[in-house]
Image (cartoon, rainbow, N blue to C red):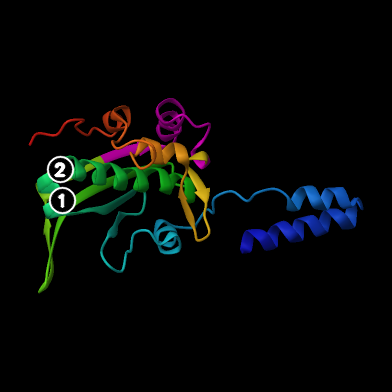
Amino acid sequence: MRHVLLALAFAYGLSLSAGPIAAQVSTLGKTAGPPIFASAEKAFDELGDYSVELGQVKILKQSPLHIQIKAEAEAATVRLSPTVMVEQTAEVLAYGLFRMFIHTKANEVTVTALPVLQTFSDKGSTEKVLKDKSVQVRMTRAQAEKIAREVIGVQNLDDLVVKELVGWGWSKQMQKTLGQRGSSVVDPAFLRVLGLQVNPPK
C-alpha cells in the first residue's frame, strides 16, 4: 500500500509541474516491484512464508546475514521417496538466498537448511531434527544474479517472483526450477550450484 501511495504522490507531483494527464497515467500504469524491507526479520514477518516466532527461521547473524531455515518434511513421505528431503532443502535454500537479495539490501547471505522429519499421529506431532544432514550455502548478490541468468533463465533477481493476490510468490521460471511447475524434479543444474546431491543415496 505504501508503494501505491508513493506512486500516487509522485504522479500528482508530475501533474502539478508538467501539467499533461499522460504523465500521470503512465506513472500509475507502472507495476511496483517487489518490496524491500529494512531487515531480514521484517522481510520474513511481512512475507509470511516462514515464521521467526514459530522457530521455522532464525537470524543467526545480522551482518553478513546468516539465517537458518527448517526444511520440514513428513517422515513417512521421506521413507517412500528420499528425494523429498532434497527438494525441501533446495526450496528453503532458494528462499533464504534469493528472497533476501530480492527483499533486502543484503550483499552477502549465508543460509543453513536444517532438515526436520515430522511425524503425525492421533496423539499429536513430533519433530526429529537432522543436524548432521544440514546444508549451508554462502552466496553474494553477484553470484545470485549470475545463477538467476545462467541457470534459472531470467534477466534479474526480481524476475524470480511475481505479485499474487496475497503477497509474493515464485515466478513460473522459478517454480519450474524447483520442480513445482511442469516438472516433477528440481533442476539438477540448480541442485549442483547449491551443492546438493542430484541422486541422494537410499
Magenta span includes 113: no
SS class of the residue under badge 1?
Answer: helix
Q: Within the image, what quadrant is residue 12 found in?
A: bottom right
Where, quadrant-wise, is the N terminus in this rendering? bottom right
Do the numbered discs 2 and 1 sit on residues whose CB atoms are within 8 Å? yes
User: What segment carries the magenta color?
Assistant: 137-158
Q: Which residue is pictured at 79% across the width and 55% down the height? A: 11
- Say above or below: 143 vs 175: above
Between 56 and 182, which is closer to the camera in this rendering? 182
Residue 14 on image: x %, y %? 83, 53
Determine which residue is flagged by label 1: 77
Question: Is residue 64 in sight in this rendering?
Answer: no
Q: Which residue is pictured at 35% across the width and 54% down the height? A: 62
Decide: few, some or many residues near mark 1? Use Cα within 10 Å; few <14, some 14-19, many ≥20: some
Determine which residue is flagged by label 2: 81
Between 138 and 185, which is closer to the camera in this rendering? 185
Please state if 90 lies on the left or on the right of 35 as rendered.
left
